[in-house]
Image: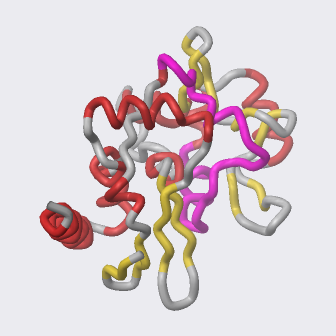
Amino acid sequence: MFQLGKTIVSEDLLQKDFVCNLTACKGACCVDGDAGAPLSLEETQILESIYPKVKPFLRKQGIAAIEAQGTWVKGTDGDLETPLIDNKDCAYVIFDGKTALCGIEQAYNQGIIDWKKPVSCHLYPVRVKDFTEFAAVNYDKWDICDPACSLGQELEVPVYKFVKEALVRRFGEDWYAELETVAEELKNNSK
């Protein structure tokens, strides 16, 4: 672990490799698990405002779940998250064949909205936990992502490079530049 500003960062972000491999996992992170995607308070407001524009991209089961539960919910631990369909799929999930995709991101890709998706989804496999004085930035190892780890090793892409856009979105360009400096120093010290 090391500190960057008001964040404590796991060295796994620099040392582990990762590149999503949708052909292998079929987007399992969007349909497996026991909770929806973590959301910030600001993101709950964004979901409420963009829902009418995203709705045409969603499956009827997702629309039904959202209209019954709301565009966001409080999870069992009190955290804000996306609603689920029958405690499984994220309500915003759509399918391209057997591959799970994000309906929000599809609306974004088509220029309908200007918000890509919840930052927690964009960051995955990085998870951020906010505390009063700092944020913990960790790599979340999940066996459904083993193909992504293998592809990352093959392509030699560390986690922090794979999620660069999302890290910049969450923490800013300056923070990411500092992260790159730390990564380079660690790389040079290990030679």
Question: Magenta residues?
Answer: 23-50
Closer-to-camera residue (116/186) = 186
Farthest-out residue, top? 97
Q: Give x and y (percent) for residue 75.
A: 80, 59
Q: Is residue 146 visible?
A: yes
Queried whether the magenta region covers residue 184, the answer comes back as no
70, above or below 58, in the image: below
Q: Which x, y percent locates residue 117?
A: 49, 45
Viewer can see residue 107: no
Judged from this view, the residue extending furthest toward the front is 191
**Which part of the image, by quadrant, shows the C terminus?**
bottom left
Q: Residue at x 62, y 12 (%)?
A: 98
Q: Please tell me in which quadrant of the rendered image residue 87 appears.
A: top right
Q: Residue at x 55, y 76 (%)?
A: 130
| Observer-nearest of 29 and 101 | 29
- Residue at 85% across, 61% down: 76
Magenta stretch holds residue 46: yes
Residue sitting at x 76%, y 40%: 66
Please, is residue 53 above or below residue 178 in the view?
Answer: above
Q: Residue 81 or 108: which is nearer the viewer?
A: 81
